[in-house]
Amino acid sequence: MNIRKFEPYIYPTNDYVFHRVFAREGNEEITKAFLNTILSTKVEEIRLDSNPIQMPMYLGDKTSILDVKAILDENGRKKLCNIEMQIRNQYNMDHRIPYYWAKLYSGQLKQGEDYEKLCKTICIVIVDFEINDKDTDFCSEYGILKKNVKGEDILLTDDLEFYIIELPKLRKKLENAEKIDNKKLVAWLKYINNPNEVEEKDMEDNEYLEEAYRVLEDISSSEEEKILAEYRIDAWRNEQSVKKHWQKETKKEIAKKLLDKGVDISIIIEASGLTKEEIEELK
């Protein structure tokens, strides 16, 4: 395939782009292939949640930067998975990571239901900064273990599983030409960190990475999606100067600008959280 160059706002570190690649229904096989390079057990089937947490369109919204929720089947056992992408270090990830997990885990039960209905919940967090400077591993798995046990880990429960991926640590290893065994995961993370660094050899025997690459080509070819991607990256890059301005604007004002640019109503609904009727009133 022909390797093309993408603008930085099309990189999957952009939360809109990441969500478009890994959370949209129809991309299940892409997400499954990515997860199978990270998780300790193989995912057989995957269903993307049809009602993910609404992504923020502007800085005033109080939501996670990215929320990809999936229902997994590993050898007939149902599991829940949440994937988060965070590019800004707010120095609170030690609190946010268990919060992401707890919100998904506790949300399984309705009042009066038995705890036995709870299934394993996995939280994967990809960050573009270092969380633990005492550890050089770029991908780390965590659980709930008994302390001070020599020679082996004693697991309290396997219902909780965290994976933390720190992109700067991977970049250091690649710059130093260090040997990394999990080549497929490295190829996926190169795609997320900077798709311009992906080479044809990275996509050999990895049809779903190639498919994910084509999603970026689709975004680059769509004026509507480019507008949405640019809105997100511009907001973060210019946070200090843009924040006050964006807080003054209402969702309807932003929706009106998107309408004027010819963006499809369905995309504006997804981005703004407004109803179809509210948006049509702006015409």
Image (spheres, helix red, strand yellow):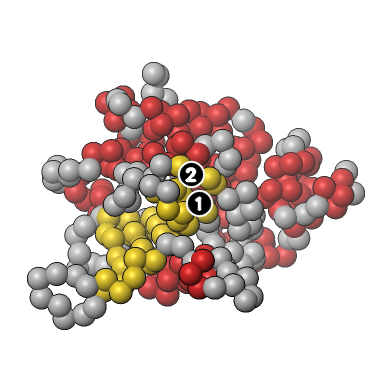
Residue found at the very far top of the displayed protein: 1
Q: Amino acid at mark 2?
A: Ile
Residue found at the very far bottom of the displayed protein: 148
Label 2: state its secondary structure. strand
Asked if the residue under mark 1 is in contact with the one under mark 2, i.e. CB atoms within 8 Å, the reply is: yes
Q: Is residue 244 left or right of residue 15?
A: right
Residue 268, x across and y down, in percent: 72, 46
The C terminus - image quarter: top right
Residue drawn at the location 27% of the way across and 59% of the way down: 140
Q: Is residue 243 left or right of residue 18?
A: right
Residue 44, x across and y down, in percent: 41, 42
Query: Which residue corresponds to mark 2?
Result: 46
Q: Amino acid at mark 1?
A: Ile
Query: Which residue corresponds to mark 1?
Result: 71
Residue 104 image label? none
Label 1: state its secondary structure. strand
Q: In the depicted view, which residue is nearer to us: 174 or 113?
A: 113
Mark 1 burial class by Cα count in 10 Å: few <14, some 14-19, many 20+: some
Sequence-wise first label, 2 or 1: 2
Residue 36, x across and y down, in percent: 35, 44
In the depicted structure, whether residue 254 falls above or below residue 111: above
Q: In the depicted view, which residue is nearer to us: 32 or 41?
A: 41
Residue drawn at the location 58% of the way across and 40% of the way down: 25
Q: Is residue 199 visible?
A: no
In the depicted structure, whether residue 267 falls above or below residue 206: below
Q: Quadrant of residue 182?
A: top left
Q: Is residue 43 left or right of residue 279?
A: left
Residue drawn at the location 52% of the way across and 54% of the way down: 69
What's the CA distance linking mark 2 and mark 1?
A: 6 Å
Residue drawn at the location 45% of the way across and 37% of the way down: 30
